[in-house]
Image (cartoon, rainbow, N blue to C red):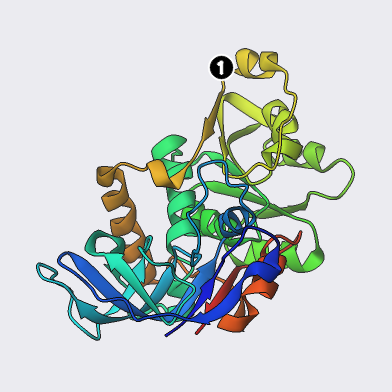
Amino acid sequence: MKAIRVSAFGGPEVLEVREVPDPRPQAGEVLVRVRAAGVNPYDTYMRAGTYASGNPPLPWTPGSDAAGTVEAVGAGVELKPGQRVYTAGTITGAYAEKALCKASQVHPLPDAASFAQGAGVWVPYATAYRSLFQLAHARPGETVLVHGASGGVGVAALQLARAAGLVVIGTAGSDAGLSAVLMEGAHHAVNHRSEGYRTKIQGLTGGAGVDVIVEMLANVNLAHDLAMLAHRGRVVVVGSRGPIEINPREIMSREAAVLGVLLWRVPDRDAAEIHAALQAGLANGALRPLVGAELPLASAPEAHRRVMEPGARGKIVLVP
């Protein structure tokens, strides 16, 4: 089968198409024929050898998010060949024609979702769900700011927050991004490149501040986020590309909280809750993963360049 392989850490050019042996599932394992593989920013950090949570041993095939059909199963697995599924992690990597997974990493994909959408379920939607509900404990009627709302996690957070009855503010950096933010569930869209945008956000809350902020670029925004919070407000840091200096008094005066999310640390019980919520939302149409681009497997280097560009819209997927 064909798979993307990384033999040395480096830039996007180290992503190469190789012929590799087909995996064979053992007991408790599932072989998935990949119809689409999701590209996530953390894939680029691992490819570069700069992932703070740990770099993979080489050679390596990137990707945790995929959607497709069950090809074969090992002993003790209840899934059936041909069943539509999405993955929440793999053993051998998702950027390939087939991916070997633990049975616990494979979940039914509702018929309402396409394979391309299924490849954008786990990392974006699980991150957004955990941020909003398991960490920030967002409640109906509260105001949430999704800071950087046009990307994969941002779109997921908009849809989840709107469905849960929150007042949703989303930011983006272009007219096209702002239109997408409104289309995907925000009550208000604000250009975070415009002068005075933070004052506008405060005005939308009547001066009370926002209750929850889902932050995609904390190294740029966190200090300003703290000053926009309501009393007992919460910031959940989804992404950061470096350090930042903050004033702790902004946290103290509001009795606020800053929380970090790392999907790989989610306990099994919380993960089961997330999957149940996401499958229900996909089935009833409340959750609609936005696919920004579908590229062939050989275009993995281009996908890695695009996913890190400012203003990326929706999910980039690779189609073997």
Front residue (pair 120, 27) = 27
Q: Amino acid at mark 1?
A: Glu
Q: Residue at x 61, y 61 (%)?
A: 8
Q: Residues within 10 Å of mark 1 (few under 14, many from 20)?
A: some
The correct choice, above or below, for 276 with respect to 271 in the image is below
How many numbered marks are there? 1
Q: Residue at x 24, y 72 (%)?
A: 30
Q: Secondary structure at mark 1?
A: loop
Residue 164 in view of the camera: no
State the residue position of label 1.
Answer: 255
Front residue (pair 67, 139) = 67
Q: Residue furthest left?
A: 76
Residue 166 in view of the camera: yes
Which of the 4 image quadrants contains residue 86?
bottom left
76 left or right, relative to 18: left
Which of the 4 image quadrants contains residue 316?
bottom right
Q: Residue at x 78, y 38 (%)?
A: 198
Residue 158 x %, y %? 55, 56
Residue 145 x %, y %? 62, 44
Which of the 4 image quadrants contains residue 282?
bottom left
Q: Residue at x 26, y 52 (%)?
A: 272
Image quadrant occupied by the N terminus: bottom left
The correct choice, above or below, for 266 with respect to 14 in the image is above
Residue 253 x %, y %? 64, 13
Residue 184 x %, y %? 58, 65
129 left or right, relative to 184: left
